[in-house]
Image: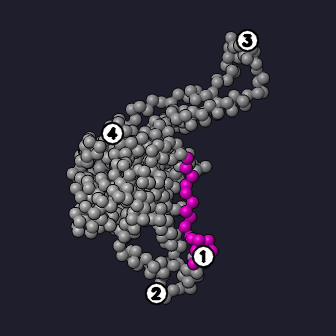
Amino acid sequence: MDLIPKPDQVASAASNVAHKVLYGGLADLRPMPRTLIDDGPLREVYHYRPQKKTRETGDPVLLVTPLAAPAICYDLRRGCSLVEHLIQQGRPTYLVEYGEISFKNRNLGLEHWVEEVVPEAIKTVGEDAGGRPVHVIGWSLGGIFAALAAADNADLPIASLTIVGSPFDVKQVPMVAPLRPILKLTDGGLVTQLYRMLGGAPKPLVRRAFQLSSGTKLITKPLAILQHLDDSEWLAQIEAVDRFTANMHAYPGRSFGQLYHRMLKANQLLSGRVNLSGHEIDIANIKAPVLIFGGNTDGIAPIKAVKALVPLLTGAHEVRFEIVPGGHLGMLTGRAARATTWVTMDEWIEQYSTPDDPSGTPARKKASRSTSRVARKATQKATRKTAQKPARKVTPEATRKTAPKPARKKSTPRTPGPAADVAPDRSTIGSNPERRFASASSRNLTRKS
């Protein structure tokens, strides 16, 4: 809005204020519809339903949620939802989240997510998508989880790995709120006693830490709202971010302690080796191609902190580092991300996607799924097809009598069912080096496998 508002700006501002007062907000916060396909201890895997006019094609995408952050980071609001974008592209889209963390979960360490939650989610998604390899996308701590899981288990069906705003060198982070000032004064002793007593980092503390990471934005927010009072899109984004911040989760005690002592104090990620549950995980063991994003105004994971991962990926087929506009959340799901981050993701996923079956028959992929849910659907479909043949009025006895006749044999319908269409063997998908190719972009950092 101009310093001296124009008539149309005044009208837009008045309309936005009225909409806020009468309807509670401007943002369309409806979540994208999804279905739970697998769950376990602090593990929920969802499949987002495709749109009616869009058919799912290609390899699936799994979105890995950070610890303590709500899953709506990927589905912030309509128009600024990475989930919505992927579904519109016809990409099979999945998400793993962890639910509420409580005091009873205080003994869970990071190995629970790295060795169990994320690997199981990747396997589940691959099976649900018909045995196809999975494109894994992780934001913030979710990206660290995804990288450690890929490095720890070479057998996971990973087609590519995308890491968004994940700091691998915390020394480059200007403020690790609210721990850094306390660490300097007490050498961490007080922090250790606090998280042990509380069973972790409670939700109010996590929420406040994320708000403080915005620095001056928190102080200047009221003035910024007045300046953008005529911009409904800007105001809608602020509402969506406020809802995201209000839904932060707690950190389990042991996991928080590992993050504090190993990641913050010892900066283990910078070495490329992290010790969890008695064994060492080496980032260099990642073989899949890796795409890394750094936000140009990210205060939680600055560009240098994120780029520190690049030299550690000595075993990856290809490594690409991209700088995109936005802060820690904005680079993932801000308004500018629609024309920057998301476009690069689309190109990357397409580059490392497995070609569809030459016949192009969707039923072949569906028939190869191993989940009981799909098997039940196929059985129901078979029953319906069989029930649609009453016009023939052929009894079982008549069928047996006429079966030897060639004409009758040809006209006898084949019994449909889950095994009617045999899916192609996809056991070697992702292992063919000839389908992998590097980008010609000058920003590409190629690693030979």
The earlier-in-sequence mark between 4 and 3 is 4
- Colour mode of the rendering: one colour
Name the mark on residue 21: 1
Q: Is residue 377 above or below residue 312?
A: above
Task: Indicate whether residue 302 is drawn in magenta.
Answer: no
Q: Disc 1 vs disc 2: which is toward the camera?
A: 1
Q: Residue at x 55, y 50 (%)?
A: 34
Side (left or right) of 388 relative to 330? right
Q: Residues within 10 Å of mark 4 (few under 14, many from 20)?
A: some
Q: Does residue 188 appear in the picture of this structure?
A: yes
194 or 275, which is in the foreground?
194
Q: Residues within 10 Å of mark 2 (few under 14, many from 20)?
A: few
Q: Magenta stretch: give its range.
A: 17-35
The earlier-in-sequence mark between 4 and 2 is 2
Q: For the residues marked 1 and 3, what is the alpha-carbon distance in whole angstroms?
A: 77 Å
Asked if labels 4 and 1 touch by Cβ distance under 8 angstroms, the answer is no
Q: Which residue is mark 3?
A: 401
Q: Disc 4 vs disc 3: which is toward the camera?
A: 4
- Give residue 11's position: percent from left, percent from top: 58, 82
Q: Residue furthest front?
A: 197
The earlier-in-sequence mark between 1 and 2 is 2
Q: Which residue is mark 2?
A: 3
Q: Which residue is mark 4?
A: 153
The earlier-in-sequence mark between 1 and 4 is 1
The amino acid type found where label 3 is placed reads Lys
